[in-house]
Structure formats: structure tokens, C-alpha cells
Image (cartoon, grey):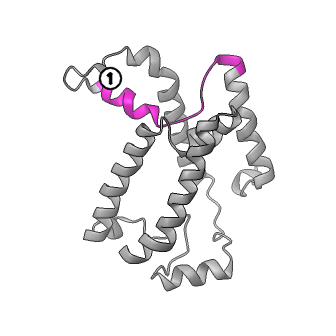
Amino acid sequence: MDILFQPMPWYVAGPIIGLTVPLLLIMGGKMFGVSANLRHACAACNFGNIAFFNYDWKEAGWWNLTFLAGSIIGGFLGGYVFANPEPIDLAASTIADLQALGIQDFAGLVPADLISWAALGTPTGLIVLVLGGFMVGFGARYAGGCTSGHAISGLSDLQLASLIAVIGFFIGGLIMTYFIYPLIL
């Protein structure tokens, strides 16, 4: 039982995730990903008569919505029920870099200085939340999938478009980390 309270090593978790993708494809013809749920949610709400959302979302989205529900339940179990009480093991250089940006609390999975109701209630937090959410949603739709869809499913499926998308995600992440984020914190 103690194993549930310990972080899973990358060399165990990575292959499990990587092998899940081909198993899903081979056994059920299912793709591993989350971002398609946004389209299914819009189709379920039936906003107007937009052709893009006019399809049988129950038939097409059952797998994705079930996967999303399982992810939320699994996240809750991992974050609250089987939470590791130890602080995250960060490199001293990473802590120093984050402290230089004003982040001081490293007690949880994510810094409370960035992800908390108090931080999101500030004008900067609200702008980051709304603008960031829009850019992630638009980018996932425009790229034909989100970061996990391209990086896990697409690369496992040896898709060139996913390789290009993942390279773009990393370049965007580096630009955000080194040039934009220091300006908005």
C-alpha cells in the first residue's frame, strides 16, 4: 500500500504511458487525448446550428469523455487521497531561479504564488488565466490536438505533424519561460 503514496519513477511511468497508446489503438482503435472533449462539450450544449458541432457527440465522444472523467478522478486520488506529504524534490538552481521571479512557496505540487484563488484573483492572474486558456484552447484546436495528444499519441504513432507540433510546443515554452513570464510576474 505504501507504493501508492510514493512518486512513481519516470522509468516506470513513462513506459506505462507509452505502451498504453498502442494498446488502445490495437485493442479498441481509440486515441489517447483530452482536447477533443472541448468539441464534444460544445456539441452537447448545441450552441446555434454550427456545422462543426452538429454531430452525434454521444457516439463520437463517449470514449473521450470517459477518459476525461477517469483523469479527473485519478488526479483527485493522486493529489488528495494518496498525496505524498514530502515536498517536491527541486534542484537548488531551479528554486533560486523561481525565487528570483517572486515565487517563494514550494510546499505543494504547484506554487501557491501562481496557482491559488488569491493569485488568480489579481489582474495579472486573471489575464494569465483567460489569455492562457484561450491560447491553449485555440492552439489545441488549430494544431489538431493538445500537447499530450501530439506528444504521447502522435509521437507514439510516428506522425510527422506531431513531431513538428511538439517542437513548436517546446519553443513556445522556452519563449514563455525566458521572455514573457518574467515580464508578467
Does the magenta-highlighted stretch encompass residue 33?
A: yes
Q: Nearer the viewer, residue 101 or 166?
A: 166
Asked if 31 appears above or below 127 in the picture, the reply is above
What is the x, y in percent for residue 154? 63, 35
Left or right, 112 with respect to 42, comes to right
Residue ID at (38%, 27%): 40
Q: Quadrant of the C terminus?
A: bottom left
Asked if 175 appears above or below 58 in the picture, the reply is below
What is the x, y in percent for residue 92? 67, 82
- Using the rendered image of the protein, determine whether residue 85 is visible from the camera's viewpoint: yes
Does the magenta-highlighted stretch encompass residue 4?
A: no
Residue ID at (52%, 23%): 63
Three-letter code, disc 1:
Phe
What is the x, y in percent for residue 54? 30, 17
Element carrying mark 1: helix
Asked if 44 appears above or below 124 in the picture, the reply is above
Q: To which residue does mark 1 refer?
A: 52
What is the x, y in percent for residue 123? 25, 69
Q: Is the stretch drawn in magenta largely helix, strand or loop?
A: helix
Segment colored magenta: 26-44
Counting the numbered discs, the total is 1
